């Protein structure tokens, strides 16, 4: 059997004041982790975590054929998990593109969750009255 090639993963966990966790991973055997990218991502993602109802976030960065890919897995209330992807020629541009997507996804889910109301037992919707 041929040996399987395992990708290097470098991870950093970031804790902010609300005990919400952000995990950033580089998943590529040739990519070197950049402290400048981690600080840039930390600033952007901490801002999102403060304003949105996100319990946990995983950011996976990868390079394939000269293009950068970022996959964000966000954990929202009521055990809802959302997966968002972005591709670009620059890693910083990828991060700038995925931040509004995360915000929109979180706000859309929160709006849907807040608009939900249960009907009381016995209440029947009869439709329009004639």
Image (cartoon, rainbow, N blue to C red):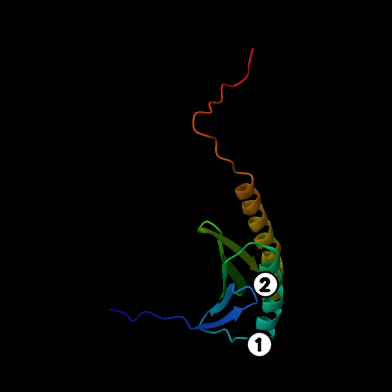
Q: Is residue 82 visible?
A: yes
Q: Quadrant of the C terminus?
A: top right
Q: Earlier in the sequence, mark 1 or mark 2?
A: 1
Residue at left offset 60%, top offset 70%: 70
Q: Which residue is mark 1?
A: 35
Q: Which structural element holds mark 1?
A: helix
Q: Which residue is mark 2?
A: 45
Residue at left offset 64%, top offset 44%: 115
Q: Which structural element holds mark 2?
A: helix
Q: Is residue 59 above or below residue 81?
A: below
The quadrant holding residue 102 is bottom right
Q: Is residue 24 above or below residue 118?
A: below
Label 2: few (<14), some (14–19) or many (≥20) C-alpha neighbours in 10 Å: some
Distance from label 1 to label 2 (Cα)?
Answer: 15 Å
Q: Is residue 70 above or below residue 11?
A: above
The quadrant holding residue 52 is bottom right
């Amino acid at each position: 059997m041929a040996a399987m090639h395992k990708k290097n993963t470098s991870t950093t966990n970031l804790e902010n004041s609300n005990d919400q966790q952000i995990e950033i991973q580089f998943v590529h055997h040739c990519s070197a982790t950049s402290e400048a990218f981690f600080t840039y991502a930390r600033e952007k993602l901490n801002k999102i975590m403060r304003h949105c109802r996100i319990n946990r976030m995983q950011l996976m960065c990868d390079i394939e054929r000269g293009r950068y890919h970022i996959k964000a897995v966000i954990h929202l209330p009521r055990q809802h998990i959302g997966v968002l992807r972005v591709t670009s020629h620059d890693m910083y541009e990828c991060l700038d593109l995925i931040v509004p997507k995360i915000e929109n996804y979180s706000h859309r889910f929160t709006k849907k969750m807040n608009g939900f109301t249960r009907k009381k037992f016995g209440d029947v919707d009869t439709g329009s009255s004639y």
